[in-house]
Image (tube, rainbow, N blue to C red):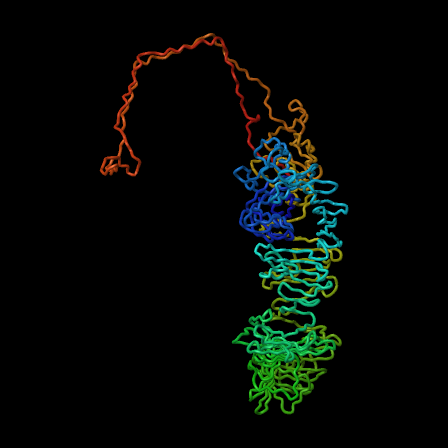
Amino acid sequence: MAGNLINITDAGRAALVAAGNTGTVARRVVEIGLGTAAFTFDKGMKTLPNERKRVTTFGGENVSPDTVHVVIQDDSNDRYSLYAYGLYLDNGVLFGVYVQNTPILEKSPTAMLLLASDIVFASIDAAQLQFGPATFLNPPATTERKGVAELATQAEVDAGIDDTRIVTPKGAAMRYMPFTGGRFTGPIKIAKGTDAIPDDGSSVLQAIGNSRTTGTTYFGPDAKSGRAHTDDGRFYLTSDGDMAVGPGSAGKLLLTSGNVQRVAVTPQGRTLVGKRLYDDGETAMQVMPEGTEGYAFAVHRANADGHPQTIMIGASPSATTRNENVIESRSALDNAKPLVLSATSDVNNAEPSRGVVAIWMQVLGQTKAVLTKDGEFLLGVGTYATGPAQLQVSGAARFGGQIWRGLTNTMLVGSSDSAGIQNAGTGGDAAVNNARFSADQVGAMLNLGKSRGTKVGEQAAVAAGDELGRVDFAGSDGERIVPGARIQAIAESGFAKTSRAAALDFSTVASGSTSAVVRVRISTSGRTLFGTTQDNGRDIIQAKGSISASNGVISMGIDTAGGGQLRAVSQDYGAFIRNDNRDAWLMSTDAGDPFGKYNNFRPFQWSLINGNVTIDGTGLGTRLGGDVGISKNLSVTGVGYFAGGSGTARSYGSGVILGANTGGDVVLKCANADVDMKMWDMQSNESQFNMRAVDDQWTRGIPFLTATRENKSTAIRSLALVPAGGRVQVAGAPDDGSSALAVRGSVKGVNSAGALVASNGGGSGQTSIHLRRDGAPADQKTWELMTGGDGSLTLRTVNDAYSNSQTAISVSRASSYSLGAMQLMPQGGRVMVGPAKDDSSVLLNVGGMVAASAPPAGDNSNKLVTSAWVTAAILNSQVGQIVWEARTGVRAGYLKLNGAELKRADYPALWAYAQASGALVSQADWLNGRWGCFSTGDGTTTFRLPEMRGEFIRCWADGRNDIDPQRAIGSYQGDQNRSHVHGASASEVGDHVHSAWTDAQGQHNHPLHDPGHAHGVRMGRVGVVATSYGQGWGPYNWDRQDMHGTEGAGTGIWLDDAGIHGHNVGIGGAGRHSHGITVNADGGNEARPRNVALLAMIRAY
């Protein structure tokens, strides 16, 4: 793969941003995830989809600023298809993903996955990602170790010296010239081009491409054994032309024998075989016999076992005795064989995954019979396999004999002595399995005792919902018999010998429909369902729909829940009539239990013994919506008066009086109260309802509540409390003697706008809300939220007399609804924000971070600046600044001065600085020694940094030509020593001699000692057998070879002395001469002062 574009995730891009957003930071890739399915990339991904595993055996190196060469290895025994891989950073973040729709590689358990990929980053600097080295995955190849080797150049192949690089086929072809005069022991392959030549496994010579022979090619040991040559446009084999291959006059490829054409291949690819080469112009291979008699094609079996077998094909093979087109199988009389027509898939008869394996028989272009792969024989045009029957016929069938079922002859169709269907036998064979009583396409059906097998005659356990049998009732639509109503038996779960649970369905077909619908079901438990198949498992008769009874319905027992005899049920509640042989009840159930027992309500009850009726026996209230007629007394607990007038109300005692006084009226009277304190009334008229305190004469009253309704409506227009004056206290609030409304607790207004409104009642003057602590010290009780006459909003403190105030917050209002200015503590005070403490001097103290919009760049006013403004101002002034530090990694905001090529769009500030620096040169000049400058990169999108690694710094002469003349800024200067010489000499020595001697050593001798040695021999008595019996003495070998030895003896060696003597040594004179002096070289490969290595960096952003 080359150039796989990596999709970078949002989390991966964020991981390259340094802390505080001060630049970029390098990251290390520690894991690579392998994905086994394709997917759509999403920048929000946190993990690689379809990830099978993560590997750490990988390495990589930068091959260009935007490309990293990565090698991934997996030598496990895993099996998978690789569609994607993802890079995980050292902080666990999924950095980037490569994915494609087709597999990248296929990993098998026995193979090692080794993927080399060039990863391309379109929008980031590839140097920000660090990988381990790839050399551990790609070790150098040797003769003892597998590894990676470089390809040899053609010059290296031609030289034949390098023993580390690999020769390519092209290089070898150019290196090794054709071999002449030798003998090849293996196959020879010849090709004009460089394409691969397939090996046929047998030929010793293979040629791919055109070849030309100008002479005759001989085959065999001599010229007459066989040869091939061309003559007059034909190609001949053998010397007398018994076989010819060539176009001929008709453009055919002809095979001749005895100069007679026997085989021809037409230009269109048809093959003609026989003496009479007739071509019908269509058939690919055509075989013609010699004459009108005989077969055209025969296949013979070898006759080695004495049993000849033959298959012969002929087109009307005899003009005299037969005129059929024949496929004939002939067998030996003593070993006859059948003619087999076989249709299969392969030699293993494997099940095909697509297509049809069958034998089709066609007449006049139509398929008349089909033998399927499942053994079904389909007879007739358009017949399809629709069931397990082995023989299926699309039309009528006539049988001259009887049709038998199975091996017991228990079922007979169409016998000679009875009509229809006979079924004989006992047990399971006595059942009618599936019969239609009609000669038409459908007919009526009787299906009793059906098995659950997938094939005819097969038995299997019956499962829930299986059909046990059915009877279909059919009629005619004038053209054919069509099914109508049906009786059908359905098995339920656990159908077996000991549990034969089955339901019975009765189905009809509605008018205008063609499908039967179940109308009645009798369940296995004897419950009968009308109009539904949903069994509630409770009621013996269930009906979906209305029920009508002409002679009434009688219920003689309590239902199973213990409720009543007749029950009406809704979703949440049930109601029923109960007769317990003493009382009759109208009762109901608790919520959520419509089929349950009765609850505690007793709405209606009457005694069956004395007829006494009780309404609302639990006292929960009764409402009568119309006129009520009471033939006897009405007993009321309390006082109740009806239709009383003003005159009679005065004379009644204490109680509730219902009557009329300028409208419907209710009077509550306490006869023992003081004067004009006895009565309260509730009065209504055509538009209002009043609750009043009235005098004793019921002639005047003062309302404390007045409700007014909208005209001709049920809507309430207004509700007035104490409209004639007074005070209202809510929720136990005390009466302070002044407040019109006092509330104990909170007041809540609910509305989308104006839930609570404080109004001045009219005009443009102020209005306000007071927040008061009645128990606070003097002048500390009240805060006021006020809108003034000028439209401003003010939060202030006021004194108890409401004569003085001090403002905390004031917001002015401009025209319309626009705001003006907001003032904090305009009359004095201090403001703290957050956890700041009050130091009694600072007007604004913020205990936390404050964010604001920064002033314009270069602003020099009294505006407050932000950290971003300060940072930008500092950074803008420092971009391009070069620093040296004792560190190995770059500081945030800096880049190494390593000559790297950068994208201009990634570092716009640094690119702007480079353009204005005067040290921007072309890429060619930069490569020619100006690497202390910036370069223009590719000329359009990139630029290059100065290269400062390993260099000493010399200040630019800038015109001071007496020191470093004519130097260009940023130019490189090699090392050099100042010119100097070294003198050396040796003093001359005149003629002289050197004397030498040896001292006499005196008389001495050299002793030599020889202690002698012996060899031990183990001896023992052994039997010795010779020409006569006896005993002897000989070696006893102790399981070893015989050992013999001699007695020890010295050599008697002695060295004589040499006497007193000396050795004289003479040395001749050398004459006048001098001695040359060599001065050895000193130093290393450069000139340098003492130094310390520091990292050179440049401010980039």
Instruction: Tell me if 998 is positioned left or right of 945 in this view.
Output: left
In depth, the one of 1101 and 178 nearer the eye is 178
Q: Quadrant of residue 375?
A: bottom right
Instruction: Tell me if 1026 is positioned left or right of 650 in this view.
Output: left
Q: Quadrant of residue 627?
A: bottom right
Q: Is residue 552 visible?
A: yes
Residue at figure coordinates x 62%, y 26% from the top left: 974
Q: Position of residue 153 (x, y in %)?
A: 63, 34
Image quadrant in which the C terminus is located: top right
In depth, the one of 462 and 418 nearer the eye is 418
Q: Is residue 139 above or below residue 525?
A: above
Q: Is residue 876 visible?
A: no
Q: Position of residue 637 (x, y in %)?
A: 60, 85
Q: Position of residue 1074 (x, y in %)?
A: 50, 11
In depth, the one of 257 and 539 nearer the eye is 257
Q: Position of residue 709 (x, y in %)?
A: 72, 75
Q: Is residue 130 above or below residue 344?
A: above
Residue at the front extreme? Answer: 320
Image quadrant in which the N terminus is located: top right
Q: Is residue 712 above or below residue 877?
A: below
In depth, the one of 45 and 753 nearer the eye is 45
Residue at the top extreme? Answer: 991
Q: Quadrant of residue 397?
A: bottom right
Query: Could you tell me how many numbered marks the image carries?
Result: 0
